[in-house]
Image: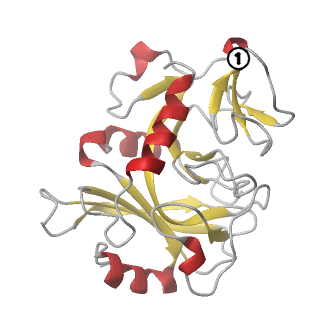
């Protein structure tokens, strides 16, 4: 994946996303993450699919345990305007909250070379020692994964090395939060491998490696997969408004 791919991907989302009145219009895969409340650091993930864009959603498999941000959740910038949401905190840069809302998913990334990620249907970015997630709001590359060695001018002072010493990013999925890269609204949000079932993240959604691999094998860009991530009590209003999957 070339340097510009993430930027083009996010730009395309910002320009072509369906109207907020019908964010699931063309989706046939929906990942629902529910938390007990806004301050929760754990939750559950449910995968839903439908055979057509007008069909009924059906849950696949069992609920998957996940860990969330150290500070819980906050409304993020996705396919639903967070400013119009009811009560609840807002997601900002460095607040250790996972973004709540409805978001597109992809591309995927990992430590394996491109050839080893052929089983992943999402566009796949192999991480190198020079791949960085830029979280400096003043940077031209804010909220992007970039290869430092291929940048003409490094204009950021803050970033995360994506090829970590641990396996947390061995496999992962980019969550299209803040696709327009609004400065300070939060950046580089992923679904990735957890450290363990009780250690929260700094703003991402994480799970056991075996569960993430199953999710990666299933997700298909042709089905336009979406992530819906909210506290449990907020899901009902979103469900009725946006025709989200019914929970069992």
The local secondary structure at tag 1 comes to loop
Q: Between 230 and 134, which is closer to the camera in this rendering?
A: 134
Residue 52 in the figure: left or right of residue 235: left
Render colour scheme:
secondary structure
Residue 153 image offset from top left, x and y in percent? 78, 18
Quarter that holds the C terminus = bottom left
Q: Residues within 10 Å of mark 1 (few under 14, many from 20)?
A: few
Q: Is residue 200 visible?
A: yes
Q: Is residue 210 visible?
A: no
Q: Between 1 and 37, which is closer to the camera in this rendering?
A: 1
Q: Badge 1 is on which residue?
A: 151
Q: Quadrant of residue 169?
A: top right
Residue 17 in the figure: left or right of residue 203: left
- Image vertical order of residue 205 relative to residue 102, above or below: above
Residue at left 26%, top 56%? 27
- Image vertical order of residue 166 relative to residue 180, above or below: above
Residue 102 image offset from top left, x and y in percent? 45, 64
Residue 156 in the figure: left or right of residue 30: right
- Image vertical order of residue 212 relative to residue 57, above or below: above
Q: Quadrant of residue 86?
A: bottom right
Q: Quadrant of residue 25?
A: bottom left
- Image vertical order of residue 129 relative to residue 233, above or below: above
Residue 164 image offset from top left, x and y in percent? 71, 29
Residue 208 image offset from top left, x and y in percent? 53, 48
Residue at left 32%, top 32%? 121
């Amino acid at each position: 994946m070339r340097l510009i791919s993430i930027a083009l991907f996010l730009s395309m989302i910002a320009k072509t996303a369906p109207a907020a009145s019908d964010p699931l219009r063309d989706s046939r895969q929906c990942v629902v993450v529910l938390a007990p409340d806004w301050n929760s650091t754990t939750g559950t993930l449910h995968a839903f699919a439908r055979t057509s864009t007008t069909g009924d959603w059906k849950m696949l498999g069992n609920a998957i345990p996940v860990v969330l941000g150290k500070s819980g959740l906050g409304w993020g910038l996705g396919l639903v305007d967070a400013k119009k949401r009811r009560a609840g905190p807002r997601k900002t840069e460095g607040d250790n909250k996972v973004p709540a809302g409805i978001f597109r998913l992809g591309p995927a990334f990992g430590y394996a070379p491109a050839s080893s990620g052929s089983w992943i249907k999402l566009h796949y970015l192999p991480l190198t020692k020079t791949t960085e997630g830029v979280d400096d709001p003043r940077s031209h590359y804010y909220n992007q994964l970039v290869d430092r060695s291929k940048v003409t001018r490094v204009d950021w002072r803050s970033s995360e090395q994506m090829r970590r010493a641990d396996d947390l990013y061995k496999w992962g999925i980019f969550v299209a939060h803040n696709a327009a890269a609004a400065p300070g609204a939060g950046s580089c949000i992923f679904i990735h491998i957890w450290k363990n079932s009780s250690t929260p993240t700094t703003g991402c959604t994480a799970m056991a490696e075996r569960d993430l691999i199953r999710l990666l094998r299933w997700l298909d860009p042709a089905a336009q997969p979406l992530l819906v991530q909210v506290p449990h009590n907020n899901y009902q209003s979103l469900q009725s408004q946006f025709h989200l999957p019914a929970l069992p």
